[in-house]
Image (cartoon, rainbow, N blue to C red):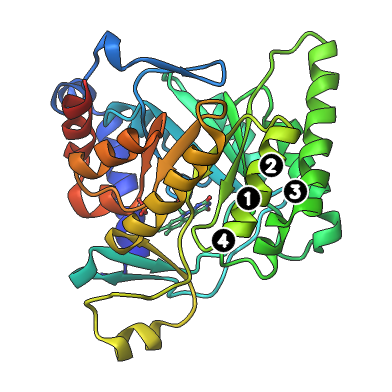
Amino acid sequence: MPPEFVHLLVMKSLKIAYFIPGLKQIFKFLFCYNKLDLEIQIAGVHFKNPVGLAAGFDKDAKYIDQFAMLGFGYVEIGTITPKAQPGNDKPRIFRLKKDSALINRMGFNNNGADEAVENLKKVKSKITIGGNIGKNKITPNENAHLDYLYSFEKLYDFVDYFVVNVSSPNTPGLRELQEKSALEKIFKTLFDKRNDFLKNGKLSKPVFLKIAPDLSVSQLDEIAELVINMKIDGLVVSNTTVERNNLKTDTHFVKRIGNGGLSGKPLKQKSDEILKYLVFKLGNKVPIIGVGGIHSEIDAQDKFKIGAKAVQLYTGFIYEGPALIKRILMKIS
Ligand SMILES: Cc1cc2nc3c(=O)[nH]c(=O)nc-3n(C[C@H](O)[C@H](O)[C@H](O)COP(=O)(O)O)c2cc1C
């Protein structure tokens, strides 16, 4: 069955299960692993445990209660754009089974910031929520900061932290926003708005930056410098890669799939390498969330050993199922 259809089917089934009396408790008993020593604070935000759902899975904040029942310590919703948009034509997710990987070119399909807010109002679980925000496809890059601002304002009261996503390979030109002056403009806009909110008595919400694994060393240096200078609250490392190196899947098959971001096992090494480099550059000053290629408890432990303060799962969660979350938590506690 097409991966996107399976995804929808699984999420709808989980939603039904959630409302069947007693099933929620069984799920919690099977999958949740609560221990005090797993609780952490990152950039002033409390996380019940450091294993989260990566952005892209629950784009519209529809299934947060269901993910909480599977044991995640936090859920990152989005990427949310100001206006709803359909994303790219289907098919747009492809399985590379031999590599335990996916290639996707979803293109920020989502129902927009206003609907996300309505869905967030219905969440019952006390789980930490991140708001991953992006720009609409039709918005030119010079106005991108206004798109980020729109979703930031809308979501401010409903999420615990934000992630500025400028690293998806599936929105034309988006990755150009990883360049210094573009990032400065976006973060200055958001931090000015946050200062206004603080003056009006609202809580401070940290804003993280999610980066691509395909950046050069000089680009990473520039980002590290910017993070320090602008006091960006943290990093999410990393998004999917546009590279197709060292795959076991037939090259012709991979070529036929075409454009998109590669995630899963083949991403692990690359994502770990840039995580290591940024931990080396930033030390303990800036918290980093590690994501990319976690398919086992050892993979997650690698990211923590390198210096990640928390991790996120996407492709590994699809291939290994929800039991992976508990396995990681038992390993690190
Ligand atoms: C189908 C799919 C959709 C995704 N959508 C988003 C997204 O909307 N925003 C985002 O920041 N990352 C998105 N990602 C990237 C993931 O959040 C994650 O950074 C990446 O997949 C690497 O982690 P993994 O190897 O565990 O999958 C998506 C990934 C996949 C596979």
Residue assigned mark 4: 215
Secondary structure category for the residue under label 2: helix
Badge 2 amino acid:
Glu
Residue assigned mark 2: 225
Q: In the shown orientation, is residue 53 left or right of residue 296?
A: right
Q: Identify the residue shown where x is 21% and y is 20%.
A: 333
Q: In the rendered structure, which disc, 4 or 3, sits on the residue that comes first in sequence?
A: 3
Residue assigned mark 3: 183
Badge 4 amino acid:
Leu
Q: In the rendered structure, which disc, 1 or 3, sits on the residue that comes first in sequence?
A: 3
Query: Which mark, by number, is residue 330?
Result: none
Residue situated in front as seen by the camera: 57 or 193 = 193
Secondary structure category for the residue under label 3: helix
Badge 1 amino acid:
Asp
Secondary structure category for the residue under label 4: loop
- Using a 10 Å C-alpha cutoff, classify the residue at mark 1 as few (fewer than 14 neighbours), some (14 to 19) or many (20 or more): some
Query: Which mark, by number, is residue 221?
Result: 1
Q: What x and y, as percent, mark residue 266?
A: 30, 64
What's the distance in space between the residues labelled 4 and 2, CA to CA?
14 Å
Count of all numbered marks drawn on residues in the image: 4
What's the distance in space between the residues labelled 2 and 1, CA to CA?
6 Å
Q: Nearer the viewer, mark 1 or mark 4?
A: 1
CB atoms of marks 4 and 3 within 8 Å: no
Q: In the rendered structure, which disc, 2 or 3, sits on the residue that comes first in sequence?
A: 3
